[in-house]
Image: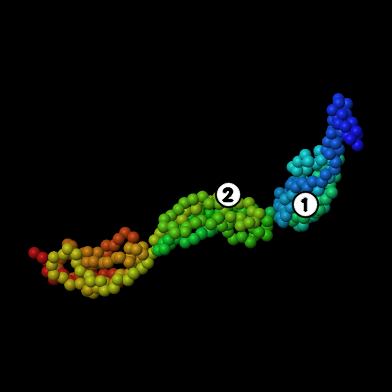
């Protein structure tokens, strides 16, 4: 045994032995490279020649998985995009379609075989396409700061073109924007906002609109009853009937809560009037943001008894 081993070592060390060893290694590599292997390849699916009045729905297959068998040197270098599955829908009608798949649907090189296709059948549904013009609705997210409210919303353009499956498009009354955040806002905002398809296969033109939101302080009303009415900066003797007035005012909550009416703000103006009886309107001077909702009475009977000398 020792003699045999010494002989092998001696041959391996000679030129002849090295050549034999090289041949054995080369044959081994060739056999390894040409041994059949199995590989799973995800092949993309595309549709072509789709009729212009139809669209593909319920396509749950974006790719199919091919189990390929063949020599390692071939199988390991295969490109999924070069084997793309292209389904021709020219002349298709609306409704459900099925495409049983076979190896000849794919660009498979010679020497490679298809062991399995998953899924074996591509199911899809074609729907008629409808186009409508629909108004745009602004979807809000959150609420303005306490004491504030949304005073005005403007969207441009006010309507957009919507194209999609007839069943989906006909159910729509409007197209909403993606949520516009107004949480704790105290002022207005103006921005471009995308329109939402709400997960439906819709095409919207244009895809964005300009949204303007005006937020103002909450308006409240407050009654002021039995306000004493007198003349302002008038020197003389006079009487006013009735002697008091009623006012209902509205304005920003923070202003109305602090508002106090004085004789300098609510009065009758008697400047330039002579002695005798007069019908005089009430003069009301208020902060710019405050408005008069109601006043009683509208005019007052003033009797000027004597003018100051």
Direction left: furthest residue: 309
Residue corresponding to mark 2 = 206
Q: Residue at x 41, y 63 (%)?
A: 146
Question: Which quadrant: the N terminus?
Answer: top right
Is 65 located above or below residue 268 in the figure?
above
Q: Secondary structure at mark 1?
A: loop
Residue placed most toward the observer, 262 or 37: 37
Q: Residue at x 41, y 57 (%)?
A: 186
Q: Residue at x 33, y 63 (%)?
A: 255
Q: Is residue 128 left or right of residue 177?
A: right
Is 257 located above or below residue 215 in the figure?
below
Mark 1 and mark 2: Cα distance apart in space: 29 Å
**Residue 109 in view (yes/no):** no
Where is residue 235? Give x, y as percent: 13, 65
Where is residue 38? Give x, y as percent: 82, 46
Q: Secondary structure at mark 2?
A: loop
Q: Image quarter for residue 306? A: bottom left
Residue corresponding to mark 1 = 92
Earlier-in-chain disc, 1 versus 2:
1
Q: Is residue 172 left or right of residue 158?
A: right
Q: Residue at x 22, y 73 (%)?
A: 243
State the colouring used for the structure image: rainbow
Residue placed most toward the observer, 157 or 104: 104
């Amino acid at each position: 045994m020792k003699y045999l081993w010494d002989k092998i070592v001696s041959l391996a060390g000679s030129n002849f032995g090295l050549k034999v060893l090289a041949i054995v290694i080369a044959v081994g590599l060739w056999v390894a490279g040409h041994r059949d292997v199995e590989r799973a390849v995800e092949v993309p699916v595309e549709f072509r020649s789709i009729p212009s009045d139809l669209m593909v729905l319920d396509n749950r297959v974006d790719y199919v998985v091919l189990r390929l068998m063949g020599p390692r040197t071939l199988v390991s270098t295969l490109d999924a995009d070069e084997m793309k599955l292209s389904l021709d829908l020219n002349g298709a009608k609306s409704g459900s379609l099925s495409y049983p798949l076979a190896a000849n649907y794919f660009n498979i090189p010679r020497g490679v075989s298809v062991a399995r296709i998953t899924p074996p059948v591509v199911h899809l549904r074609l729907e008629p396409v409808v186009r409508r013009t629909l108004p745009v609705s602004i979807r809000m997210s959150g609420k303005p700061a306490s004491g504030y409210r949304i005073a005005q919303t403007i969207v441009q353009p006010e309507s957009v073109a919507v194209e999609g499956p007839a069943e989906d498009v006909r159910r729509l009354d409007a197209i909403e924007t993606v949520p516009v955040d107004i949480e704790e806002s105290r002022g207005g905002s103006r921005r471009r906002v995308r329109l939402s398809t709400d997960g439906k296969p819709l095409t919207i033109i244009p895809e964005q609109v300009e949204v303007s939101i005006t937020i103002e302080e909450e308006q409240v009303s407050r009654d002021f009853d039995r306000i004493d009415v007198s003349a302002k900066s008038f020197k003389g003797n006079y009487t006013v009937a009735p002697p008091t007035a009623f006012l209902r005012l509205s304005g920003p909550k923070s202003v109305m809560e602090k508002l106090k009416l004085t004789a300098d703000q609510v009065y009758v103006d008697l400047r330039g009037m002579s002695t005798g009886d007069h019908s005089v309107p009430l003069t009301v001077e208020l902060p710019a943001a405050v408005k008069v909702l109601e006043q009683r009475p509208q005019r007052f009977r003033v009797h000027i008894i004597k003018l100051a000398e």
